[in-house]
């Protein structure tokens, strides 16, 4: 039974997440009761990223993924339909699949051999005739399947809550941004595949540390990434100072913080002052032929975009074109990497890294990208290693009785945001570094934690959402 | 007496719940198997999990309606391979 913190006198969630004053109690990140409540009310309710259809291209293909702490099977059944099932036998709970990926005709539980078709139906029960006397209705004991699943331009998302809005409604203004993250570099929808297998590792910190700061905390970069910024890990080597990011052509677009506090999504994305997209700028200087490939693809994309304004993308759309964003609650994305942050206990996060690459790109292009992302990202990537250093020490330094008396500061840029008629429904922070995006995620987090059902948090209504009543600023 | 230490001549006859000499994962598609209840099935697919085979019923004295249908067969229901 989950204990609802909101009922505990002056320790209710509103007192712990006081964003009007820019303060958030450390308890939100370290309290076991709050964590248990998150699993039920955030991860049991929200749309979550599960995987990509390219990971299960053939009938019978499967991968294991996570929704909250719980392991799920993403599989394509023999009729070509994709499913997401809880990885647990309905008989005694044993995992019915113990391989990270593969191809199966059926999922057979190794405990008592109940066996399930790839469409989730229980198709075999030992002794069904001679000991169950055919009285067990197999049709009622199939694998537990998510309440809703969505294949969004190749990316697979799911929710356990049948009352959740459609995935596109859940995304709101960020739907087009997510769509672009799964385009090929030539601008074709669903033109990608993911490198396999995913990188997976665990960080000794609460999941919200990375999830609520990534794509919303540019203020950390100057100090945290001081060394990697000088290490010339970008594909251009030491040219132009040797930055860690690929080089991009200038274009009249402004990178800003963008947040939809009503939905919890936010990012560091661009407002464009000119239609179209930037020309291609060579950056893969050490990898023969890669720039030629991307230049050709990029021109195809420029033709497709034409004279449209493409707000809420990176300033130079295309592979590594800048811009990253976060879909509430726990996945950060850009057009070259997907960063799910899975909770694994209040003080542990299981991070996954998946990297997009043009499905039809030649091998030397895929190799160049793989080498770059491994230098940059994941458990061995030098940029993300910098980040982990902070999160992994911030968590234990916040556990103490004395430490918990001191709230975190979320003041950066508070109240200095605005809206723009070009992107309705989006709050913008463009006056330097801001914690707008982090505040917007926490705002939505409180709403999920307080609400008894989706009816209270969608459609979004100021009169329903008590956490925002009277709030004038983010 | 410790279980399993019975003299050979006192042991009960082995129940054939695993076909003698048959390794269920190696049974090829097309093989015909006799099941408990004297049903005969032709193996359509071997799940290769050591437990289950998909079979088409060719004979089914106890339940004639099964003839022509396909269903999953658990290895302990297999008596022997028939030619």
Image: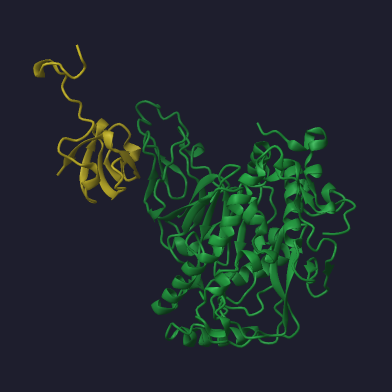
Give the percent coordinates (x, y) of residue A148.
61, 51
Give the percent coordinates (x, y) of residue A54.
47, 65
- The image shows a total of numbered marks equal to 0
Q: Colour of chain A?
A: green
Based on the displayed image, in which of its 4 quarters is residue A329 positioned?
Answer: bottom right
The answer to whether residue A209 of the structure is visible from this angle is yes
* Side of A88 where A157 appears, left or right: right
Q: Residue at image x 48%, y 36%?
A: A90
Q: Residue at image x 27%, y 37%?
A: B75
Rendered position, A435 above or below A106: below
Which image quarter is the C terminus of chain A in? bottom right
Question: Going by the picture, which residue comes out furthest to the left?
Answer: B9
Based on the displayed image, in which of its 4 quarters is residue B79 positioned?
Answer: top left
Give the percent coordinates (x, y) of residue B70.
34, 45
* Side of B14 where A285 appears, left or right: right
Q: Residue at image x 43%, y 50%?
A: A118
The answer to whether residue A150 of the structure is visible from this angle is no
Q: Residue at image x 10%, y 19%?
A: B8
Give the percent coordinates (x, y) of residue A21.
84, 52
Chain coloured yellow in the rendered structure: B
Based on the displayed image, in which of its 4 quarters is residue A132 positioned?
Answer: top left
* Side of A80 where B69 appears, left or right: left
Say which of B15 and A96 sits in front.
A96
Query: What's the colour scheme?
Result: by chain
């Amino acid at each position: 039974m989950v204990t609802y913190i909101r009922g505990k006198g002056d320790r209710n969630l509103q007192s712990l997440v006081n964003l009007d004053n820019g303060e958030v109690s450390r308890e939100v990140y370290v309290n076991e009761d709050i964590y248990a409540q998150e699993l039920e009310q955030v991860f049991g309710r929200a749309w979550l990223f599960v995987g990509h259809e390219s990971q299960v291209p053939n009938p019978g293909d499967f991968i294991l993924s996570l929704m909250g702490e719980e392991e799920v099977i993403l599989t394509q059944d023999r009729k070509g339909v994709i499913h997401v099932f809880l990885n647990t036998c309905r008989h005694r709970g044993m995992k019915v699949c113990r391989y990270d990926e593969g191809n199966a005709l059926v999922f057979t539980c190794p405990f008592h051999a109940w066996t399930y078709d790839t469409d989730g139906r229980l198709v075999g029960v030992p002794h069904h005739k001679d000991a169950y006397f055919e009285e067990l209705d197999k049709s009622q004991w199939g694998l537990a399947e998510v309440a809703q699943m969505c294949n969004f331009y190749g990316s697979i998302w799911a929710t356990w809550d049948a009352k959740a809005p459609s995935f596109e409604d859940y995304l709101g203004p960020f739907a087009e941004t997510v769509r672009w993250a799964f385009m090929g570099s030539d601008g074709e929808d669903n033109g990608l595949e993911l490198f396999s297998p995913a990188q997976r590792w665990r960080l000794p910190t609460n999941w919200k540390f990375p999830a609520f700061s990534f794509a919303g905390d540019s203020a950390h970069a100057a100090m945290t990434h001081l060394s990697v910024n000088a290490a010339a890990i970008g594909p251009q080597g030491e040219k132009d100072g040797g930055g860690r990011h690929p080089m991009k052509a200038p274009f009249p677009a402004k990178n800003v913080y963008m947040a939809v506090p009503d939905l919890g999504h936010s990012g560091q994305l661009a407002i464009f002052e000119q239609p179209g997209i930037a020309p291609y700028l060579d950056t893969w200087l050490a990898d023969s032929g890669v720039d030629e490939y991307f230049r050709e693809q990029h021109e195809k994309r420029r033709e497709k975009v034409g004279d449209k304004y493409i707000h809420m993308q990176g300033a130079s759309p295309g592979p590594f074109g800048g811009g990253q964003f976060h879909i509430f609650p726990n996945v950060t994305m850009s057009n070259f990497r997907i960063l799910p942050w899975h909770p694994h206990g209040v003080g542990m996060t299981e991070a996954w890294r998946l990297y997009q690459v043009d499905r039809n790109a030649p091998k030397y292009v895929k190799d160049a990208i793989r080498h770059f992302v491994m230098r940059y990202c994941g458990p061995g990537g030098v940029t993300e290693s910098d980040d982990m250093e902070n999160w992994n020490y911030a968590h234990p330094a916040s556990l103490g009785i004395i430490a918990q008396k001191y709230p975190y500061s979320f003041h950066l840029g508070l109240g200095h945001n605005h809206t723009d008629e070009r992107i309705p429904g989006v709050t913008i922070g463009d006056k330097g570094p801001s914690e707008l995006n982090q505040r917007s995620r926490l705002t939505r987090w409180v709403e999920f934690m307080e609400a008894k059902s989706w009816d209270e948090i969608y459609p979004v209504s100021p009169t329903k959402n008590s956490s925002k009543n009277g709030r004038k600023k983010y | 007496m410790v279980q399993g230490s019975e003299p050979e001549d006192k042991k009960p006859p082995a129940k054939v719940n695993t076909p003698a000499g048959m390794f269920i994962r190696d049974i090829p598609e097309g093989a015909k198997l006799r099941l408990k209840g004297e049903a005969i099935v032709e193996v359509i697919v071997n799940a290769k999990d050591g437990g289950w085979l998909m079979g088409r019923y060719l004979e089914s004295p106890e339940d004639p309606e099964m003839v022509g249908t396909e269903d999953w067969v658990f290895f302990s229901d297999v008596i022997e391979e028939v030619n």
